[in-house]
């Protein structure tokens, strides 16, 4: 075809001969590219299959079980782990790398605890000692479901063996009713649901019965602390012998789950009656609840302070989550949640200057006109997740209501991200305060960071509900800041001033860092089928409970 070539290109046949090797080389190059792409595709397919098989292995035994004992991870499985075929392998490879980094951070924290504080409550990583304020091996119980979800078989087995052999509640010991319920009872129940290890339910039954005696006050309002041997309860004198709203209103999930597994509704009745009691009290003009209630009279305490920070926070969260746990069948919780969430938006919101961030203030009084206090705890950052989840699960209101609440949750989370982004360390302080021309400032008396989880909790929930990658990016930046400033040789430590470099560590690895902060970060970079939000409810210590189907 040299004549055709010469005619088409208007060149001589001799020159056409010169084109032959060039065309041949181009053809070889195209064949090489096609072959290379095929090899790359096969490699990526192999990686996807490996990831899928790795996650499929989780639905089998997470660890060896005694003979004749089955795991709920067999059939039916409480966590349906499915790894969808990635559409963008490069992004998913990065996500998997980040998830593995969080897992390695957990293992670093666990190794330090096991080496220097095994069987004690919390590790002091710098002094290589421990803090034993509850004397229950708190980190082991609080970390158990994180170990399971991260598929750490050996560590899980070690934790359950310690619980079976060494966790003894038959001791003359006074404990916080609230903290023991959410951390110990909650951790044992979640671990049981994920494994069906009977010893975990037996221990939960034991501590549940001992904690239950806190309700034996003259009014049924539980005492703040309880002696788990004698059953004697009391509330502190500094609160005029009142209990705190967050304490009495953040135990209903745990006692309901315990009652369900023991098939004994009476276990939950007194906890649920507390919510009925709160609803029956005289309503304030705002519809919000102050933070103290007397255990002797059953009436409001001396302070009218309203807050979604310390003393009030998780009460509002549990109104929504009790409705979800019961399969959206118990209207009292939904009714109270709707009333309070609307009041929070209406009366507690400040728009900052100049960025118009959504700042969730406190109130000095619960009646009108409300007196706002421009103070916001890091603890409040759970509210981003709460409002978003409340809107996403709502089935009683129109889309305008749902959109308003969802956007409010997004806006709170945006402010919480700024709490991290605007400090020298990239880590948020315990408290911020409104500042006229600079949105907010770090509270001079609360510049510390305790390894808290609330902001990454909201990142996790909002990512699951929106798929917006910005929440993963925000979460990764927080994780990198923690790695840079909180990681020490034998674990992780809080810091005393988020705006001071180099940092000054407080030498304490809180148990909730492993129960909540690292768990939420791990789930942020995990497939949505790992603890799906339409099938599980997290308690306020990040222990997942399966939604009731009956």
Image (cartoon, rainbow, N blue to C red):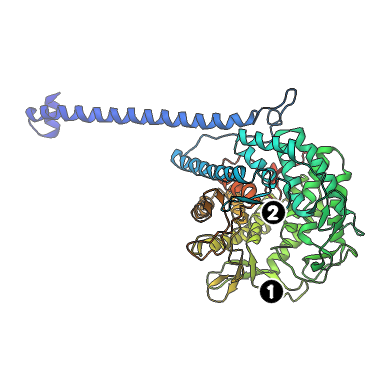
Say which label, 2 or 1, has the lower sequence index. 1
Q: Percent x, y for residue 420?
A: 54, 61
Between residue 105 and residue 417, name the one nearer to us: 105
Query: Relative to residue 419, is residue 319 drawn left or right?
Result: right
Q: Is 281 positioned to the left or the right of 400 in the image?
A: right
On the rendered structure, is 97 left or right of 521?
Answer: left
Circle 1 sits in a helix, a strand or a loop, which is it? strand
Residue at left offset 65%, top offset 57%? 382
From the image, which quarter does the N terminus lie in?
A: top left
Which residue shows up at 19% across the image and 29% down it?
23
Image coordinates for residue 3, horizontal then vertical, percent: 11, 25
Q: Is residue 445 above or below residue 257?
A: below
Instruction: Please tell me in which quadrant of the rendered image residue 197 appears.
Output: top right
> In this orientation, which residue lies closer to the viewer: 399 or 511?
511
Q: Residue at x 80, y 67 (%)?
A: 239
Q: Position of residue 226 (x, y in %)?
A: 83, 54
Secondary structure under tag 2 reads helix
**Residue 339 is at least partly visible in this image:** yes
Residue 546 at least partly seen: no
Q: Is residue 281 left or right of residue 34?
A: right
Q: What label does residue 398 carry, if any?
A: none
> Could you tell me how far apart the alpha carbons at marks 2 and 1 are, in whole angstroms?
24 Å
Mark 1 = which residue?
372
Q: Mark 2 highlights which residue?
A: 390
Query: In this picture, is 348 found above or below 191?
Result: below
């Amino acid at each position: 075809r040299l004549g055709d070539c010469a005619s088409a290109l208007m060149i001589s046949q001799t020159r056409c001969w010169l084109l032959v090797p060039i065309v041949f080389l181009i053809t070889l190059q195209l064949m090489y590219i096609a072959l290379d792409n095929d090899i790359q595709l096969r490699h990526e397919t192999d990686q996807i299959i490996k990831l899928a098989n790795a996650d499929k292995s989780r639905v089998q035994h997470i660890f060896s079980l005694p003979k004749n004992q089955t795991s709920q991870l067999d059939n039916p499985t409480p966590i349906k782990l499915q790894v969808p075929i990635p559409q963008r392998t490069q992004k998913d490879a990065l996500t998997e790398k980040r998830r593995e980094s969080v897992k390695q951070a957990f293992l670093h924290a666990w190794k330090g605890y096991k080496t220097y504080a095994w069987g004690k409550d919390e590790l002091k990583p710098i002094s290589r000692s421990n803090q034993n304020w509850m004397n229950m091996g708190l980190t082991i119980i609080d970390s158990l479901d994180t170990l399971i979800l991260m598929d750490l078989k050996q560590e899980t087995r070690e934790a359950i063996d310690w619980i079976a052999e060494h966790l003894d509640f038959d001791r003359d010991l006074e404990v916080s009713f609230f903290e023991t319920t959410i951390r110990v009872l909650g951790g044992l129940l979640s671990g049981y649901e994920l494994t069906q290890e009977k010893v975990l339910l037996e221990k939960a039954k034991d501590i549940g019965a001992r904690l239950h005696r806190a309700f034996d006050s003259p009014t049924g309002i539980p005492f703040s602390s309880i002696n788990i041997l004698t059953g004697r309860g009391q509330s502190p004198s500094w609160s005029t012998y009142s209990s705190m709203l967050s304490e009495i209103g953040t135990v209903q999930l745990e006692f309901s789950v315990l009652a369900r597994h023991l098939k004994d509704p009476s276990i939950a009745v007194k906890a649920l009656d507390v919510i009925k009691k709160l609803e029956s009290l005289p309503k304030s003009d705002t519809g919000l609840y102050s933070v103290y209630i007397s255990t002797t009279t059953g009436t409001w305490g001396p302070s009218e302070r309203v807050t979604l920070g310390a003393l009030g926070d998780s009460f509002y969260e549990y109104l929504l989550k009790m409705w979800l746990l019961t399969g959206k069948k118990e209207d009292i919780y939904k009714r109270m949640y709707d009333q309070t969430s609307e009041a929070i938006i209406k009366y507690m919101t400040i728009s900052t200057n100049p960025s118009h961030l959504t700042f969730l203030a406190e109130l000095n009084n619960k009646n009108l006109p409300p007196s706002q206090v421009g103070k916001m705890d890091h603890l409040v950052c759970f509210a981003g997740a709460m409002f978003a989840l409340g809107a996403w699960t709502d089935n009683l209101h129109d889309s305008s209501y749902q959109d308003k609440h969802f956007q409010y949750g997004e806006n709170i989370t945006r402010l919480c991200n700024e709490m991290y982004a605007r400090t020298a360390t990239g880590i948020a302080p315990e408290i911020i305060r409104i500042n006229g021309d600079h949105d907010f400032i770090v509270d001079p008396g609360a510049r510390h960071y305790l390894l808290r989880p609330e902001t990454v909790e909201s990142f996790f929930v909002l990512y699951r509900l929106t798929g917006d990658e910005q929440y993963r990016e925000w979460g990764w930046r927080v994780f990198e800041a923690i790695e840079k400033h909180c990681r020490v040789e034998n674990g992780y430590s809080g810091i005393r001033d988020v705006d001071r470099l180099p940092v000054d560590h407080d030498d304490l690895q809180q148990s909730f860092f492993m129960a909540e902060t690292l768990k939420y970060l791990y789930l942020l970079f995990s497939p949505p089928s790992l603890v799906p939000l339409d099938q599980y409810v997290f308690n306020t210590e990040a222990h997942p409970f399966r939604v009731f189907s009956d």
